[in-house]
Amino acid sequence: MTISRLKPLTVKEIEKLAASPPNCIKHRYLGGVPGFVLVHTPAGYTGYGLIYRAGGKRKKLTLGSTKRMSLADARALAGKQRSRIEAGEDPHDEKLEARRKEKELIQQQAEAQHLDVELMWEKYMKLVASQLRSRDEKDRVFRRYILPTVKGKCVAEITKTHALKIFDDLVGQDKRRMADKVRQEGAAFFQWLLEREHVDRNVFAGIRKANARKTIRTRVLSDAELGEIWRQSEVEGRWGLWFKLLILTGCRNMEVRAARWSEFDIEKRLWTIPTERAKNGHPHSIYLTDAMLGLLEQIPRFKDCDLLFPAARNSRNPMSGDQKIKDRIDARVRKARSESGAPALANWCVHDFRRTIATGLQRLGFRPDIADQVIGHVGSTRSGAAAHYLHHRYEEEKKQAFETWGAHVETIATKA
């Protein structure tokens, strides 16, 4: 390393120079190492630098501030950098390249945070699925089965391995129908991401179906089971009222959860589910029994909100989270049965209420076509030519059926 021929400045000399800011940026040679300078700016900044030439260009490498680095340390660092320069390296360009890489890394981290899988799913639900009747089920499937494996990841980090793990775990538990549903929902989500160039491939595409055997669910709740669920739902506030309305009306999950006050004619004791909210595309009327009216009186009404069961944070949407409530009811039923020595409650879902009321009405003496009309399910008794010619709505028969079923539920609900 070449030694500077300039007389090195002392610390006191540097302090004296730094006391008076110059009118423009000044470079004062400190000596000891060729190109080793004191950088002094009009703003009062003083620091150490190294001026050198590389590739035919004059360059300056910043070494550090005088407040953070002693003169001796700065001169030693300048000597090391000078040796690298004389060996053909260019520390200034290396520093710029390091800054560029750091900036790229920060940008990538920001993009990864922006493309967080959960945030992108929420965006997907808002833009694509917000108007679908199946939106709540889509969201439940994603959050229960897909999200636990990929939570916190950028969508671009999710691989085929993640998708196969989710799928194979469900198949391994013999949940083949749910595995296919997860595959379908995941593929739709990633196709949306692919169209927007957020990912390079659809990781759920190409996964073979689980070949689930189509099974017809036949679960019908017994009177004792229905009574237990009714009683254990009472502590759940609005959710308890929702469960009871499902049991009394035989309506579908979202038909009750998204019900609106404007659909009810209390004077005529009639609730009419409009065509756009009915699954079969036909308006469905429910006679309001005394028990149903009693439940409606308990449901709180909110200002400027037409929904019976609005979400807590957004009154424009119906409340969600029914699976958590069902799990709590199940836990209480299991505890009560365990204490009494009774067998555990068999698996059930809220859709089983529809099958239970239809079967219960037949047991109470009503014809199958009346039971179908009560639950708004017209396919089994009015298919083929009958669907074109038979349009009687059985309103009087439905009224009798609702009253009979309501009295039956009241009887079994009061049996401890």
Image: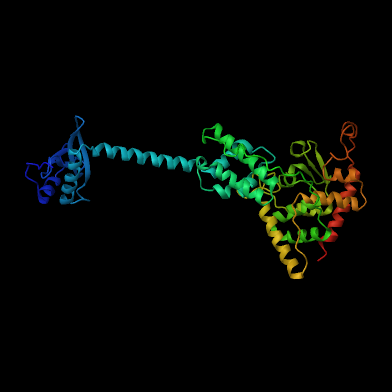
Q: Which quadrant: the C terminus?
A: bottom right
Q: x, y (%) of residue 237? A: 70, 57
At a point 15% along the width and 42% down the height, the residue shown is: 36
Which one is nearer the viewer's eye here, 275 or 111? 111
* Residue ranking furthest to the top: 56
Compared with 225, 106 (above or below) is above
Q: x, y (%) of residue 31? A: 10, 44
Task: Count every numbered label the image shows and give the total.
Answer: 0
Which one is nearer the viewer's eye here, 93 or 276? 93
- Judge from the rendering whether residue 122 lies leftward or rightward of residue 401; answer left or right: left
At a point 76% along the width and 58% down the height, the residue shown is: 346
Colour theme: rainbow
- Judge from the rendering whether residue 197 lies leftward or rightward of residue 233; answer left or right: left
At a point 86% along the width and 50% down the height, the residue shown is: 359
At a point 60% along the width and 47% down the height, the residue shown is: 166
Q: Which quadrant: the N terminus?
A: top left
The answer, for residue 320, to whether it is visible in the render is: no
Res 82 → quadrant: top left
Which one is nearer the viewer's eye here, 392 or 291? 392
Q: x, y (%) of residue 4? A: 9, 42
- Judge from the rendering whether residue 103 lies leftward or rightward of residue 244; answer left or right: left
Q: x, y (%) of residue 195? A: 56, 31
Compared with 96, 363 (above or below) is below
The answer, for residue 173, to whether it is visible in the render is: yes
